[in-house]
Amino acid sequence: MFKLLKYALYDMVKSRFALIYTLFMVLVAISIYQVSDDLGKVSLSLMNIMIMIVPLISAVFATTHFFNNLEFIELMLAQPVKRIHVFLSQLLAVILMLSLALIVGFGLPMFVWGADSSLLTLLLVGVVLSAVFAGFAFLASVYTRDKAKAIGISLSLWIYFSLVYDGLVLYLIYSFADYPLEKTTLVLMMLNPVDLGRVLMLMQLDISALMGYTGAFFQQFFSEIFGVALAGGTLMLWVLLPSMLALLKFKKRDF
Amino acid sequence: MNKLISLSLFLLFCCISVDLNAGQIRVKAGQSIQRGVDRALPGDTVILESGHYPESGIVIRKSISLIGENYPVLDGQGKGNVILVAGKDILIEGLKIINTGKSNMEDSAGIKFFDSQDCIIRNNILEETFFGLHFSNSKRLTILGNTINATSEREFEVGNGIHLWKCSYSVIANNQVSGHRDGIYLEFVTDSQAKENRIERNMRYGLHFMFAHDNSYIRNTFRQNGAGVAVMYTKNVLMQENRFEENWGASSYGILLKDIADSKVIGNIFLKNTIGIYMEGSSRIDFEENTFQENGWALKLMASCDQNLFQANNFTNNTFDISTNGSVVLNTLTENYWDKYEGYDLDRDSLGDVPFRPINLYSVIVEKIPASVILWRSFMVNLLDKMEKILPTLTPEDMMDESPKMKPYDFS
């Protein structure tokens, strides 16, 4: 397992993508730090990147990685190694590389110019979202035989979670404006990892506005141990669920 | 003639020496303060030595000074008022007053003044008082450097820290008030000044005034009060260089202005409030050089306000800059700095060439449906806001700053 992981990682680090992605992140972070005058604005701008770009890149990269390494995977499957090890080594390698790129890319400027708790939360949210969307990408990849199709599915999932879902929630909120919606919206946020990450950031950035009536409810929820545990647990579930489903399919799949 | 002069000199000396002798009556712990006060003649000084004085309802009706050494403790033992004052030229200094009665019927207070003039209340410590300092129908008061704390769970269990009713020409400075209902409460108070006070963690309002014309509030700090600062039905107010911080809650304001007119709000700092300023029915107020930072809503400007001027203020890192409840705009916004402004400045006059509309669509939606605040900063909402910026439909089209500043002002 570790040997497999080592080779997968080695392979990935050698590819130019990891380097380019890291450089891109560094450049983005540096330019944002240069333009914005205070940390609050930095985390705001970085947040948009984290919520939109990071899942997108994660989804596309993980899918292409899977198909590019399909031959290697097939070769490995011919060897006396467990399927679960082959699968996990690939997935973990992708997640590790994406997280590392993020941590180095955003972490380095943070280290140089300073960071606050909201930026650290942001980094964590970015890592988790990378993992979630890598899971989705692998799920899409094991269920299809065609690379283009798999990328299509990953992209649709990305569009759904970062755009369509919020539209639906907004529509729902608008339609049922006369009812108390706090708990409902909270549950709805739990059902979308991107929103969950965003809400965790809101708690840091827009605390003053959130202290309005309903906001106070959210604030209270997320400041309690129970709320944080629930949010963290749900995010974990979002990391595990797609990858587990993908693993189940991978185990049975006829290559 | 010489005789006359020497006689008058002699008389003068007598007067002075009498004045000097009239100085002191010392009261020790265990003795009655009231008896000490009764013995004193006008102009005398009653000195309380340090110690514990379980006494309440001390009445002072003549011009004396009551001064404590090393903060003697006047313990009201939960009964009524500790000191009652009605007179002229009275000085109360260096006392520690604790445990007044807790009654809304008689408004128990640490020190209560009626119909007094030219009194000075300086450097006292008040703890667990129902009302701290309570003044009615008085003039020319100097309330200086007092520390007034209470610890109470609920709003109705405690009175106001510094309470003035129907007073004038007074100064309230360098006091520190916390844990009361209202920090400073002024009703029918005119021509007075509140300066450099520190008002924190009170149950209701940090500062609360009504019908209190021609007053000024300078360099005070209002932090974490239950509902911030609320001022009503008043004209000619000057608020300058105050700090309004961390007033959090659904109905919590940096300042709530209701029916205020002809006033100036200059150089204040609004930091991390749920709502920086909420205005209703207010007219002809100038807001200049204020800093609005990290508020939920920097301004809630109701449509009932008119002829107000917002000029040269800094708006940075607020979740929403302005929201309103109507489409009529009778106020002027000009030359403010908005960090959300995305325009350009081709003629290099440091003012943007395209107007800035500070109301965004989503703040209108959140106003209607508070629960929707949870979607703020999502991509969907950003898109909607961008569209609205290009083609205003829901937001009032006239609410705009025609010449927004490109760079923030430096007020320091």
Image (cartoon, helix red, strand yellow):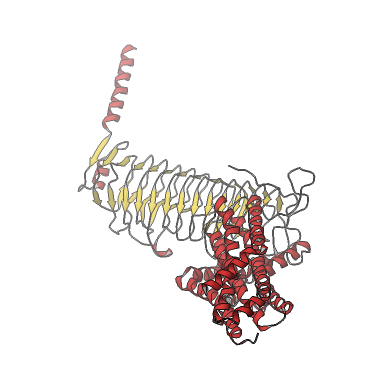
Question: Which corner quadrant holds the C terminus of chain A?
Answer: bottom right
Percent x, y for residue A173? 64, 76
Percent x, y for residue B338? 67, 52
Image quadrant of residue B122?
top left
In the picture provided, is A186 more to the left or to the right than B103? right
The residue sitting at the front extreme is A79
Percent x, y for residue A76? 60, 78
In the image, B236 versus B180, the foreground residue is B180
Q: Measuring 55% from the left and 82% from the top, which residue is drawn there? A: A80
Image vertical order of residue A121 relative to residue B140, above or below: below
Image quadrant of residue B400?
bottom right
The residue sitting at the top extreme is B2
In the picture provided, is B266 more to the left or to the right than B153? right
In the image, B120 versus B345, the foreground residue is B345
Image vertical order of residue B169 relative to residue B17, above or below: below
In the image, A124 versus B345, the foreground residue is A124
Image vertical order of residue B10 relative to residue B386, above or below: above
In the image, A204 versus B289, the foreground residue is A204
Percent x, y for residue A156? 70, 76
Image vertical order of residue B238 relative to residue A238, above or below: above
In the picture provided, is B293 more to the left or to the right than B43? right
